[in-house]
């Protein structure tokens, strides 16, 4: 591995920075469903529906509490955002780990699987930068 690649931060690095919860791990079916969306305008869901709904419900609760306890609302918002970022990093790290396991076994990863993975990265990147 070149020196340049050794210093790169990966999603696995981010996912390992805080405590991992089993319910935040993605199964193969969820990963495959996410990869099913295609095209440059594709915005495949970043989280399974139930996890996404739980995050949204918590956000609504945080917003509702702002009037009575603004400081606590901001603290809770920060905590929720950190948790969402952790879950997202874990999600990408899981996908990468699956590909690396295939490579380690000497199995060829199809160009289609790699294309879908890159599309997901691009979709997230575009959304993150509001492109």
Image: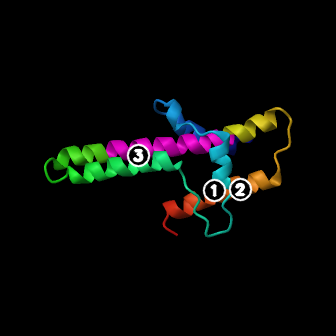
Q: Residue shown at 32%/46% (left/top)?
A: 78
Separation of marks 3 and 1 at Cα, in angstroms? 22 Å
Answer with left or right where residue 84 lies relative to residue 125: left
Q: Choose the circle earlier in sequence order: 3 or 1.
A: 3
Q: Position of residue 72 (x, y in %)?
A: 21, 43
In front of the other: 60 or 110: 60
Q: Residue shown at 19%/52% (left/top)?
A: 66
Does 80 appear in magenta? yes
1 and 2 marks in contact (CB < 8 Å):
yes
Most prominent secondary structure in the magenta stretch?
helix
On the question of residue 8 being in view, the answer is: no
Residue holding disc 3: 54
Answer with left or right where residue 38 lies relative to residue 92: right
Location of residue 38 (image quadrant): bottom right
On the question of residue 83 being in view, the answer is: yes
Residue holding disc 2: 116
Q: Position of residue 102 (x, y in %)?
A: 79, 37
């Amino acid at each position: 591995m070149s020196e340049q690649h050794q210093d790169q931060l990966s999603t696995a690095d981010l996912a390992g920075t805080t405590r991992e919860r089993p319910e935040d791990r993605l199964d193969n079916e969820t990963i495959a469903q996410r990869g099913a969306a295609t095209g440059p305008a594709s915005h495949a869901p970043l989280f399974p529906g139930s996890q996404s709904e739980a995050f949204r419900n918590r956000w609504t609760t945080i917003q509702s509490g702002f009037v009575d306890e603004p400081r606590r609302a901001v603290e809770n918002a920060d905590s929720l955002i950190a948790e969402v970022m952790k879950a997202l990093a874990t999600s990408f790290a899981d996908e990468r780990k699956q590909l690396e396991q295939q490579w380690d076994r000497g199995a060829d990863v199809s160009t289609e699987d790699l294309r879908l993975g890159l599309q997901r990265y691009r979709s997230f990147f575009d959304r993150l930068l509001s492109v």
